[in-house]
Structure formats: C-alpha cells, structure tokens
C-alpha cells in the first residue's frame, strides 16, 4: 500500500459558498472584466458589476417563481454564456443546479429530472423543450419549464423585478460549504446514472487549491480561457468556477465554432479531452500530407517529441536545439496560431493522453498538463504542474487531497474534493466511501515522488481463458492514436485470446482516399475490407502490441462498418465508450472473431 498527500494551500470556512466571490468582486471592483461573450462576430466584455446584476435578476425571478433553498433546478444546454449566468443565478437563489447534457435522450432526461425531483428546468432549444414536454406528465414535481432560445430568461428576470436585492443577499446566506450546490449525474457507463452530490465547499475549495496551489503558473494576470467542453460535465464546470474564483476571463464556444472562436478570442490556456488533441495532431498530419509536405511534418513531429524528452531528461543537445528552431518557424508556429497564438498550457482530462502526444505538444510549445479525476472527485484529484511535470503520468495530488493505492491496486482518494454522497442512493454511497476513502474503481501506481499512473479499470480487467489478466485501456489508447482509427474496444474476457473491435475515422478517410487513389465515393462499409486500409490497421495493431506481453497482445480484430456514437448508445456525452453496450450490439462480430 502506497500513499501520497499534499496539504491544502487554501482553507475554506464552513460559511463559504459559490456566490461569495462574484458578488464580492462586483462590490469591490465592478468595472473588472470577468467574462467575454460572443455578440455577432465580436466578443463583448462583461464586467463584474454587469455579471452580478444578471445573476441577481435570475435569482430574484426564481424566488418569485417559488424556488426555495435546496430546490433543484435542471439546466439542459450546450456550453454558452447563459449557462454560467444560470448556474450562479440558481446558487444565488439558494437552489441546486442539475446539469443535463444537450444530447440526452428523453429517457435520460426523464430519469435525471425525476430522480432529482427538479422543480424547474431551463432548456436551450425548441427540441429540448419538446423532449421535456414529452415526459412532463410523468414528472409531478416539475412546476416550471423555461426556454433559453425562446427568450424566457428575460421573462424570469422581469417576474422578480419588484423584489428587493436584499432577498438575494438573504438567500445567498442560507448556503454554506456543506450544502449541495449541484447534482452531477454520472455518464452511466455501467447502469443507471447516479446523482453525485457536489457541495459548495467541494467546488470552492477544489477550485482555489487547484488554481493557487497546483497550476498557479497557468493563471497569471491577463489569463483567459475559452470553454468548449460540455458544461454538463464536471471537468468544464470546475474550470468555470475556477475562472470566477481566480478572476480569469472566461468565454464560451462549442466544437463547430471552435477554430474561428479560438482565433478571435485568443485564450492563454485551454482544457480538452485527449480526443481533441488527437484530432488536432491527425488533422495537421493529413493537411501536410495533402500539401506534399508529409515528410517535413513527420520530421518536425519527431523533433518535437525528442526535444520534449530531452527537456524532461534535462539535456537538450545543440543539434536538437537548432532543428527545433527551424521547425518552430516551418511547422510549430502555425499549429500555435491555429489555437489563437497565445496558448501556452492546456489541461487534459477525462481519459488517458498518450505519452507520445504529450511530448509532441510540449515540443510544439503547448504544454499539456494531464490530470486525473472523476465526477465524484469534483473533477481533479491529481494533475501535472508546469514545475512538476512527468509526461506519461497524471501528476501528483492537488493540494488538499491524498492518493492511496490499495492492496489490490485500486486508486483511493480522500480530501476536499470528495462528493457528499449519491442522491437517493445510500447503498452506493456506503460502498463508494467505504473506510472514509472514495474508491475510484481505477487501478494505478504511485512512484517515489507521488506521480500517479493509471493502469486500467478494476471492473474492466479482462481475464482470458488461460487466466491472464489484461488491462484493455493501454492497448485502446495506443490504437486510437492512429489517424485512421476513431474508436476501439479490446475484448477477450473468458476467451482463448485477446481481440479488438475497431472503427474508422470518417474525417480522416477523405484525405487518405485522395492520397491513395481511392474513389471519393467509397464508404466506410467498403473501406473496412480494402487491402490498403487493412494494412494500415495491421500496422497500428502491431505497434500497439509492442507495449504488452505476447499473452496480452491482440491476435485478431474486426473493422466495423459504423463508428461508435452517443446517438447509438455506445458513447457517453464525455466520449467514454460504454463497454457493455458495444459488446451487446456487436455480439455477432465478436463471435465471428472466435469462431
């Protein structure tokens, strides 16, 4: 059993809540720019005073609508400026926010709204409103449904205009660090989503300790970030709170608008999941190949990786420095410009980032700080820091957190970030918090300096018929790094050998077909058996197999004719593969491998 602890750098009093900082800043420095919101083609600055006034208006409207302290208010939307206003508006009214992914099905919406007992819902689009209307007769507690695009935020604000601002001051005072601020439902990779009770103290203390104690170099004066991950996910939510707590200028975007928004907003740091970084790399590689500069890009990539590895070893040779300088002009600078030109750091979480990819981006001039955490840990439990970076690990515990490796290899966590419990689920709460530690279900190892490495999922360990234990994640991570591969699932539990289901990346196939003289009309279903595609995937599998023993290696695979998707029920909104769903839906493909 190994353990590593970092004491908190910020102690949060029991009276603290999420509204203290924005209202305090509005009182002390109302003209400070705290957000920038998209208005047409431009970004308009939002001051602390303006933001507090909008939040107050929503809070008074909620009070007028009968929302009481502790009442749940659901929020179904993509990431946008109004989400942050509504988050803080509900908190200022003493309520509990229940986020819902914009892509959720009617069944998921019914479960989350019904299980949480939400009294009101803010829904973004007409389609979202229609989804809620379809299940509303089975939600007796739901008293109000408001549409964001429908203009109902103005109506909510107007309904409370006659109330004195003192009502909001009083409501804010009813919430303390121990009170639940939000119920964040898990992605549901196994069974029904559970509502994680995240308190005001969890969010405030985790944000302040992470910002001031773990990544203080990232959040200097003039820092800004553009959020594009779903705010329904705890990772983006924690960053939202951290920007407000630290006075970092916050903007909102989404994936379709991301590239032009990055160019105009020019953030100083980003947060993303590994798939985003994989897409950036693969896109740059494909563009270079299409322009006839594939060899230059590959040389630049190898130089970036070598440069980063040398930095980690503390010994960068003169020849490597010169090559790096040349490629900085030819390649790296253009990549940095693609994300706005000012990004120095990016925080990555949600899944494992390949070591090679981490070295590549650092060599390019964008240091990716990989971290680790879950919904139940209010996002971060560990993170790599600019001054304590070990690529290939998920870093050290953030201040206020202790990491322990149990006898069976499971990662246990204790600290300021641990959820209060699961909503309406005492059994699950007792199981997850047994002995005062949160049991993550992940397997890991701590080195002598306290850097954590995640090695697999406790419940996803495959045991072959020969009794060999195999962690599928490392193989899957390596395979997804290949440009043509979108997703994969390693299988073999109870079987004679390990195999894999692989899907192709449609975005990558277009340029690939052009380079290899394939008809543009060729579909994924046709390409899955194309000899050149099969040769590419053979090479990717052989490369991935180098990382494991012969008994753990992938012996056979199938390329599927479709990709895994959230719509088909194979992916969570945070882009995790639902293993049980894929195995069920592609049972025939799996059987064909072993027959």
Image (tube, rainbow, N blue to C red):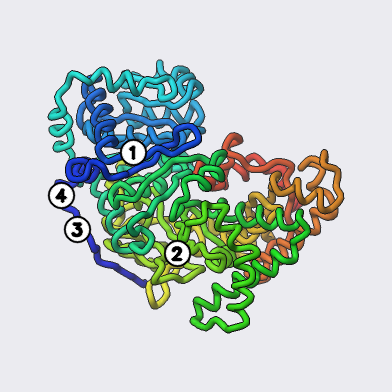
Specify whether 65 is left or right of 584: left
Say whether disc 3 or disc 2 marks the residue closer to the N-terminus. Answer: 3
The mark nearer the N terminus, 1 or 3, is 3
Q: CA distance from mark 4 to mark 2?
A: 30 Å
Instruction: In the displayed orientation, state which residue is furthest to the top.
Output: 137
User: Residue 191, how many percent across, how many down?
Assistant: 47, 40
- The residue that label 2 is drawn on is 394
Please give the residue where the numbered disc 1 appears in the rendered image. 46
Query: Which residue is painted at 46% across and 35% down in the image?
Result: 78
Task: Look at 63% across and 42% down and name the residue there.
Answer: 564
Mark 3 sits on what residue? 11
Q: Position of residue 165 (x, y in %)?
A: 16, 28
Q: Secondary structure at mark 4?
A: loop
Q: Which mark is residue 14?
A: 4
Tell me if I can see residue 298 in this picture.
yes
Earlier residue among tags 4 and 2: 4
- How many other residues sit within 10 Å of disc 1, few (<14), some (14-19) or many (≥20)? some
User: Which label number is shown at residue 84?
Assistant: none
- Camera-side mark, 2 or 1: 1
């Amino acid at each position: 059993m190994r353990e590593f602890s970092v004491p908190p750098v910020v102690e949060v009093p029991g009276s603290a809540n999420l509204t203290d900082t924005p209202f305090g800043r509005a009182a002390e420095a109302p003209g400070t720019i705290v957000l920038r919101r998209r208005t047409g083609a431009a970004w308009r600055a939002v001051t602390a005073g303006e933001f507090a006034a909008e939040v107050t208006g929503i809070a008074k409207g909620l009070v007028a609508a009968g929302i009481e302290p502790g009442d749940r208010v659901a929020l179904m939307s993509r990431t946008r400026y109004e989400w942050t206003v509504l988050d803080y508006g509900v908190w200022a009214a003493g309520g509990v926010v229940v986020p819902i992914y914009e892509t959720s099905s009617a069944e998921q919406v019914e479960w989350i709204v019904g299980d949480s007992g939400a009294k009101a819902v803010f829904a973004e689009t007409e389609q979202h409103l229609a989804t809620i209307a379809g299940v509303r007769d089975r939600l007796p507690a739901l008293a109000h449904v408001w549409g964001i695009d429908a203009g109902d935020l103005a109506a909510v604000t107007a309904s409370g205009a006659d109330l004195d601002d003192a009502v909001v001051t009083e409501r804010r005072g009813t919430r303390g660090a121990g009170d639940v601020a939000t119920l964040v439902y898990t992605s549901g990779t196994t069974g029904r989503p559970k509502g994680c009770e995240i308190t005001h103290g969890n969010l405030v203390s985790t944000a302040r300790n992470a910002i001031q104690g773990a990544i203080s170099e990232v959040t200097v004066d003039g820092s800004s970030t553009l959020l594009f991950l779903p705010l329904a996910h705890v990772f983006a939510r924690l960053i939202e709170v951290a920007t407000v707590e630290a006075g970092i200028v916050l903007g909102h975007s989404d994936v379709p608008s991301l590239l032009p928004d990055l160019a105009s907003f020019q953030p100083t740091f980003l947060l993303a999941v590994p798939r985003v970084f994989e897409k950036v790399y693969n896109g740059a590689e494909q563009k270079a190949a299409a322009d006839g500069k594939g060899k230059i890009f590959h040389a630049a990539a190898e130089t970036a990786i070598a440069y980063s590895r040398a930095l980690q070893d503390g010994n960068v040779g003169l020849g490597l420095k010169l090559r790096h300088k040349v490629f900085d002009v030819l390649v790296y600078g253009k990549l940095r410009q693609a994300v706005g030109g000012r990004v120095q750091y990016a925080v990555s979480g949600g899944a494992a980032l390949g070591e090679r990819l981490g070295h590549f981006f650092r060599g390019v001039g964008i240091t990716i700080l990989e971290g680790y955490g879950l919904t139940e840990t209010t996002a971060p439990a560990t993170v790599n820091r600019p001054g304590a970076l070990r690529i290939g690990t998920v870093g050290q515990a953030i201040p206020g957190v202790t990491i322990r490796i149990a006898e069976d290899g499971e990662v246990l966590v204790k600290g300021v970030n641990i959820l209060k419990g699961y909503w309406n689920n005492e059994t699950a709460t007792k199981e997850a918090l047994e002995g005062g530690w949160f049991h993550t279900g992940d397997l890991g190892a701590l080195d002598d300096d306290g850097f954590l490495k995640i090695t697999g999922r406790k419940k996803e360990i495959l045991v072959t018929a020969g009794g060999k234990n195999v962690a599928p994640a490392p193989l899957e991570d390596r395979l997804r790094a290949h440009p043509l591969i979108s997703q994969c699932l390693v299988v073999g539990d109870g079987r004679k050998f390990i195999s894999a289901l692989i899907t192709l990346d449609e975005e990558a196939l277009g340029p690939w077909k052009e380079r290899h003289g394939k008809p543009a009309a060729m579909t994924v279903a046709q390409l899955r058996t194309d000899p050149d595609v099969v040769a590419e995937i053979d090479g990717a599998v052989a490369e991935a197999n180098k990382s494991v023993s012969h008994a753990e290696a992938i012996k056979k695979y199938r390329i599927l004719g479709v990709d895994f998707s959230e719509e088909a029920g194979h992916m969570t909104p945070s882009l995790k593969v639902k293993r049980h769903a894929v195995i069920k839906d592609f049972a025939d493909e799996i059987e064909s491998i072993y027959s």
